[in-house]
Image: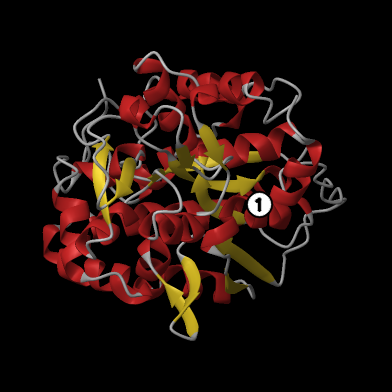
Amino acid sequence: MIDRRFLLKAGLATLAAPAIIARAETPKAIRIAGGVNFAQGQLQLTGYAAIIQHQGWLAAELDRRGVKLEPFAVSHKATGPQINEGFANGSLEFASYGDLPTIICNANGVQTRLLVPNGMGGSGDTFLVVPAGSTAKDVTDLKGKRIAVHRGRPWEIPFFRLLAAKGLSPSDFTILNIDPMTGAAAVSAGKVDGLFTMTDAYLLEEKGVARILWSSKGLAPEWKMRTEMFGRKDFVETQPELTQLVTTAYVKAAHWASDPANRDMFLEFQGRTGTPRSVLDRTYDEQGTQWRQRWAPLFAPDLAERYQETVQYALDNKLIRQKIDGGKLLAPSFTAKALKDLGLEGYWQAAA
């Protein structure tokens, strides 16, 4: 049985449900998390948040209705728990973050709805890195050693999938639950024998302090990590017009990002937190997905099934205590309307 103190520390348990909205009064502000961080001493917007700010459309539409658009900053060390807490206490309406954290949120009584698949095929690559001087050639060479992975984050599932594919289990290793920044420092200093993480692996390799042992590059979607744009269920249901505006803004941002002519500006946005351009180029060039298609905000036919599988994973690994219906998290009607209103039906290729 997993230690409940771990869940509390990670902010994954006992989330208080937001107060029930008795009437649909127009809010004074809408807060959106995702791509909003403090770096270099100031608030930095990256990804879709930066594009939406650049386009200015959403802020203008909300201003016409007397609503302010507010970025909701979170720490990279605790993105999931902070977003879940924001949804729980009603201080956050929308967020772009991972599938596993939102399932934990819903299983603890705070309901969200998936409004926009977050492009990049709805996924991102994951990596296992080792210290630069490591002699390991495969994850099997790390048996009995220390591997750092941040539990409850969207890259956890590919990590356990990798172990299973090699005939291994978590008990074959000493698994350390530490955040990405601490994990990066630990693998750089040789304090751990491996770190399972996302594309910050490229930066570690470029610095010469770590080496990529395995990556999900070129593998099927189930080996990737998922991030999507979610809305708090009670807000989505009581404020459908505002929810539609936010959804449409994300689809507009996806369309802008999908234009190769905007690639350089997009990468400039991504570099605002200090990531070198060389790392960004490698991150996006090695994905292997056609540039336009990687931003497709489309609901894949098997998306509900994949969320059901993630729910089962969370249940099996005692990250949640009760099973929920992963299919009910999906709310595709808002994106469908946005695509129609923007004349983008057929612009992206639907998954087979």
Q: In the image, is 321 to the left or to the right of 22?
A: left
Q: Secondary structure at mark 1?
A: helix
- Residue drawn 73% across and 45% down? 234
As shown in the figure, which amino acid type bears the numbered disc 1?
Pro
Residue 124 shows in this picture: no
- Residue drawn 49% across and 86% down? 41
Image position, residue 207 (x, y; %):
24, 65
Q: Quadrant of the N terminus?
A: top right
Work out which residue is located at the far top of the displayed protein and give it. 167
Q: Is residue 221 above or below residue 115?
A: above
Residue 28 shows in this picture: yes
Work out which residue is located at the far bottom of the displayed protein and give it. 41
Between residues 140 and 238, which one lies in front from this camera angle? 140
Between residues 63 and 54, which one lies in front from this camera angle? 54
Q: In the image, is 296 to the left or to the right of 38?
A: left
For label 1, the residue is 81
- Residue drawn 59% across and 41% down? 101
Category of crowding for the residue at label 1, using alpha-carbon neighbours closer than 10 angstroms: few (below 14), some (14–19), many (at least 20): many
Image position, residue 332 (x, y; %):
48, 34
Between residues 111 and 184, which one lies in front from this camera angle? 184
